[in-house]
Image (spheres, rainbow, N blue to C red):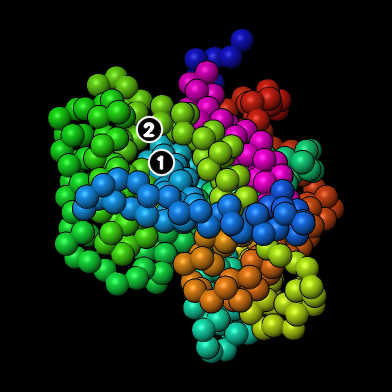
Amino acid sequence: MKSPVRRMAVAATAPLRDFLRAETSGGVVLIAAAVAALVWANSPAADGYVQFWQQKITLGGGSMVVSHDLRHWVNDGLMAVFFFVIGLEIKRELTVGELRDRRAALLPAAAAVGGVVIPALIFVAMVGSGAALRGWGIPMATDIAFAVGILTLLGRHASVGAKLFLLSIAIVDDILAIGVIALFYTSTISLWWLGGAVAGLLAVVVLRRFGVNSPWSYLPVGVMVWFAMLESGVHATLAGVALGLLTPARPVNGRAVLGELEHALHPVSAFLVIPVFALANAGVDLRGGVIGDALRQPLVWAIIAGLVIGKIVGIGAVAHLLRWRRWGTLPADMHPREILGVAALGGIGFTVSLFITDLAYVDPGLTSLAKVAILAASVLAAAIGSVLLLTAPAGTGEPINHSDEDVDGNTATNTA
């Protein structure tokens, strides 16, 4: 039997285990959706693919009418759910999760910064100038669902600690990506509408002060915040992040609001929102010599080099430096030789990289080139990361400190 302390530890890490299980299965669904989009866009029904996602849909009425094509509804509307879940995950990790311990958080946080800065610098150096330069944020991203899916397929060749390390890096990466989107990929701002969004967020704070713990009570305010953010010129999905960060991490009147929302919405994000986003955005027409033409473009090589080389160098070098200086520690059960494998998987930028591509470019030619590069880089990063992890020792043989169960829900052997 487990001691009460160990039972509490298992309960405390349950959200993390649920998160990784959903990301693992979601990664498989994401890959299937991306492949389906590519097959559809390169089939005799390719024109139907384009026409389907260009259908105009109008919602609302009067001064609150919103009209977009289907792809924009996915990118601006449905993806708000994805970013809301990211906000919830960030809030949990910073308050009650792995990132609340400064020493434990320092190494993955610093490694994530290296994995953002170095790819961006490589991209800028290779692209030089011109309209393509606006895409410097593309190689900064890490797709946690895709990457964790690859880790899980490797089975015993990837330790539990490696999964925790990758998760921590990806969450910090998400924080940085959100900042980049807000600061550098925002159009002309309407202060009136932005003020309306801020007022909506303040209303959420007031509801929290009064102890309102039903998520349904916040839904109308959340929709208003999203609409105001959309009209303000700031990307509407950031409303989801802000609302997620305002969600209380600790129980309110005995109700674990954040945990309930994560449990309810994370499967929706992993199995519906992200696959639909991939289906809408990964359909690149590769016929007629497109790949050959793409490989002659500096933009394509800048994205590939940024995601593949930049992530390995940025994450790997910083992590090894901090370990050498004893400024940070790896998760228990993670072998140092797994660092480069995890760093390489960080180069799978898929979802957020595609998202930033649509924000960065209005030229369909640049958008198409960037998507080809993202797909190529993600496949290459997955292959390199898999080889590095297959040839590295999986774990140190040390017990996992936080519970008797690993993140996949299996009982771990305690050798202490």
Is residue 272 rendered to the left or right of residue 380?
Answer: left
The residue at the point 51 percent across, 65 percent down is: 358
Asked whether residue 289 is in view, the answer is yes
According to the picture, the residue beneath numbered tag 1 turns out to be 88
According to the picture, the residue beneath numbered tag 2 turns out to be 258
Kindly identify the amino acid type of the residue bearing the numbered disc 2: Leu
Is the N terminus in the top left, top right, bottom left or bottom right quadrant?
top right
Q: Is 13 a magenta residue?
A: yes
Callout 2–callout 1 Cβ contact below 8 Å: yes
Q: Please tell me whether residue 30 is drawn above or below residue 135 in the rendered image.
A: above
Most frequent secondary structure within the magenta stretch: helix
Which label belongs to residue 373? Answer: none
Label 2 residue SS: helix
The residue at the point 70 percent across, 58 percent down is: 46
The residue at the point 46 percent across, 46 percent down is: 78
Asked whether residue 323 is in view, the answer is no
Instruction: Tell me which corner region of the image, top left, top right, bottom left or bottom right, holds residue 275.
Output: top right
Instruction: Tell me which corner region of the image, top left, top right, bottom left or bottom right, holds residue 120.
Output: bottom right
333 or 369, which lies in front?
369
Is residue 25 rendered to the left or right of residue 180?
Answer: right
Kindly identify the amino acid type of the residue bearing the numbered disc 1: Leu
Is the C terminus in the top left, top right, bottom left or bottom right quadrant?
top right
Label 1 residue SS: helix
Q: Please tell me whether residue 394 is drawn above or below residue 405 in the rendered image.
A: below
Magenta residues span 7-35
x, y percent for residue 20:
60, 37
